Amino acid sequence: MAVPMKSCALAREPLYLQVCELLTGQIANGTWQPNASLPNEVDLARELGVSPGTVRKALEKLEADRLVVRRQGRGTFVVDQTAPEAASRFERMRHGDGTPIVWRGKVLQQTAGDPTPAERRALRLAPGEGVVRKRRLVGTAGRSIGVEEACLAMGRLPGLDTGAVGDWCVIALAQRHGVRVARASEELRPVKATVETATLLAIQPGTPLLQLDRVIWSMDHSPIEWRSLACHLRDEYYLAEVA
């Protein structure tokens, strides 16, 4: 891994963030595949010309960002984002007892084509850039909780075949196409059930719902997926963890 550090005269970021950026790039471009072991801190420090403490701090941030996992006595490994615990990393809905909701979904409709104005805004697409979208009824084994609309920017996942997408999980799908997911941004707002949503959820039109809009971003700061979920909560709740 021969990667130059930024000139000290020009660098504005702390050194550990520069190291973090370089290591993230190596993960993003496939130098280190999922489950691969990274060189140890001393070797990385020597190769990058920084202190082991700087490398350690960079790895701590990568672990906090869930790009790597550090295992005592074994080393640092690239996270496999197709693993269940990684694929559900952005899920914040909980049952009343605090356990995570394991969603079950039924695809109601799936289409592909040009993006709508709302999709262009959410995914920062130019007119004509293709999307694939799906509509699902989601819930648990016991009941339907929400109606979900998801939209995927096809051009952000190289080689994507829309005919083989199916009921996708964006984190696993992105990894299969050589793209690493970095973060999500979310908006929560109260809404009222439309007639169509109320029919699907077996509730009265106008019933208060919680709408969760989420955009998934890649490590190169490109939005990949926009997902909107209108859900009818009983004892369920949304958990926000603030550092």
Image: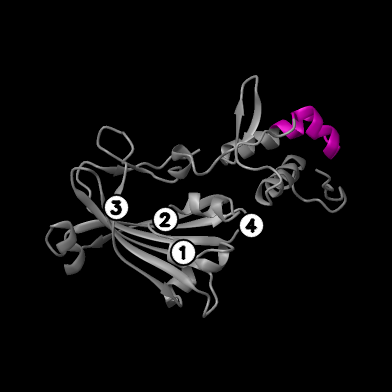
Q: Give the residue type at disc 4.
A: Asp
Who comes first in sequence, dot 2 or dot 3?
3
SS for callout 4: loop
Q: Is residue 194 visible?
A: no
The numbered mark, 1 or 3, whose residue comes first in the sequence reads 3
Could you tell me if the residues under marks 2 and 1 are in contact, i.e. CB atoms within 8 Å? Answer: yes
Answer with mark 3 or mark 4, whichever residue precedes in sequence: 3
For label 4, the residue is 220
| SS type, badge 3 | strand
Magenta range = 40-56
The extreme top residue here reads: 73
Q: Which residue is mark 3?
A: 105
User: In percent of the image, x 29 and y 43: which residue is there?
Assistant: 237
Contact (Cβ within 8 Å) of mark 2 with mark 3: no
For label 1, the residue is 152
Which residue matches tag 2?
168
Query: Which residue is at a point 66% across and 50% down the rendered structure image?
Result: 28
Q: CA distance from mark 2 to mark 1?
A: 10 Å
Question: Which is the main secondary structure of the residues drawn in magenta?
Answer: helix
N-terminal of the pair, mark 4 or mark 2, is: 2
- Can residue 13 be seen here? The reply is yes
